[in-house]
Amino acid sequence: MAKCDEGYLCSICGGDVENITQSDLYLRYVTGMLDPELLHAEPERHIRCNPTLAQYIVAEDFEAVQVEGDFDKSQLDQAHVRQRESLVTRGWQRLKEIRSLGEVSILEFPLPEAIEKFKKRAVSTRGSNANSE
């Protein structure tokens, strides 16, 4: 992660998001939940400051997050929860990989399925733009 990509302030708590492994913004990007075109425009926050997403990280080195109310994963369809846990946990693990790699192109950050999703979206967008010309 480049130095310019470090040190953003969390839009929720105001604290420093010290590195990529704490970044909700990059977690959503690597998992395909945030379009790359919006990466520069979205506010940053700590992963833990977005508990409805953080609850899906299931890893020994990540303290579990509990959510109360309608968005508590224990209240949701368990097949959906397992799928979401897999994706978000792999995304968080990818952030840890990226941090340990040093200089990596931001285009290489996402998980393979997120890259495919972005490519498909780009192709469909180009196709719809060509039809409107």
Image: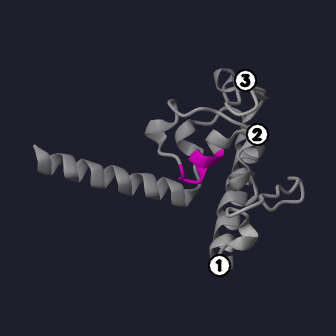
Tell me residue 120's x, y (percent).
37, 57
Q: Is residue 32 one of those drawn in magenta? A: yes
Q: What residue type is labelled 3?
A: Gly
Mark 3 and 2 residues: CB-CB less than 8 Å, in contact?
no
Identify residue for label 3. Answer: 7
Sequence-earlier tag: 3 or 2: 3
Tell me residue 28's x, y (percent).
60, 48
Q: Is residue 70 one of those drawn in magenta? A: no
In this image, 112 relative to 9: left or right? left
Q: Quadrant of residue 52?
A: bottom right
Q: How far is mark 3 from mark 1, CA to CA?
A: 36 Å
Sequence-earlier tag: 1 or 2: 2
Identify residue for label 2. Answer: 22
Tell me residue 24's x, y (percent).
67, 42
Identify residue for label 1. Answer: 79
Which residue sits at x=70%, y=39%?
23
Q: Which amino acid does label 2 sit on?
A: Gln
Circle 3: element type: loop
Sequence-earlier tag: 3 or 1: 3
